[in-house]
Image (cartoon, rainbow, N blue to C red):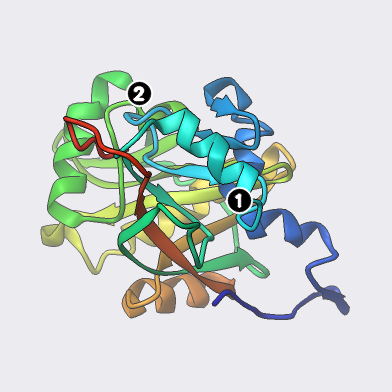
Amino acid sequence: MAQQTELRRGGASLRPTDPFSVLDNAVWAALNGPHAHLAQRVGRAARYPDDVYAFAALADPGDPAAWADLHTLVGPGTTVRIKPVEDVPDGWEMVGGGVGVQLVDTGLRAEPAPEAVRLGPDDVPEILDLVARTRPGPFLRRTIRLGTYLGIRDRGRLIALAGERLRPPGWTEISAVCTDPAHRGRGLATRLVRAVAAGIRERGDTPFLHAAADNTNAIRLYESLGFTLRRRSPILLVRSPGTSGQGTVL
């Protein structure tokens, strides 16, 4: 079950009726906002291209019509990741999942990192190699299209990374935060988070991020930087009704 944390900024309570509520369904909000140009959509269901970000979203997870639209969008017998969803309609199958946490910026010190470089499509093979070794979360062949990604190099080799993923209106998610194991303990992740946040703040958005609920080290780091835990919610891997010869995962 999703759990909400009441936050305070500047002495005012921030409840779901505040702008924070757009984060309750962040994937849908992004696909209907700044990332609409990337959206594949049928009615009240949408998804990112499967080589950009392997998630789908529903306008209202409690609406059977939205699930029908998702079925039309992904096809029969297709496995898809979706959040925040707790139950699925008859015919859909839950085949996996976990619990994630969402943290929002309530006191982060954002500042540029002079040693950070902006990464582009030509850097994707190196990014994929670093992500495979550090497992910060999904990064796919065209994930870099979602926003700005910054890296730090040592003797020309990429050793640390952070960037932008979801963009609900007014917010930008910091994602893919990782450091080569041989270079940990130098504060590289902290510098990159602050540098990515500086760019987010410059365009008027507020940083937020997600982490697996059992990734206590990452959560502890983010809280020490000025993020506050806002909610816990399920992440499901579901299979659509019907059969498909390919058993596709999106």
**Residue 32 in view:** yes
- Side of 185 where 14 appears, left or right: right
SS for dot 1: helix
State the image coordinates of residue 91 (x, y, percent, origin top left): 41, 52
Tell me, for residue 26, which label it has, or none. Answer: 1
Q: Amino acid at mark 1?
A: Ala
Q: Give me the residue at 66% from left, 43% from top.
A: 29
Q: Give me the residue at 17% from left, 31% from top.
A: 246
In the picture of the structure, the residue carrying the numbered disc 2 is: 120
**Residue 58 in view:** no
- Side of 146 where 12 appears, left or right: right
State the image coordinates of residue 143 (x, y, percent, origin top left): 37, 32
* Location of the C terminus (image quadrant): top left
Pair 1/2: label in front: 1
State the image coordinates of residue 20 (x, y, percent, origin top left): 74, 61
Q: Amino acid at mark 2?
A: Gly
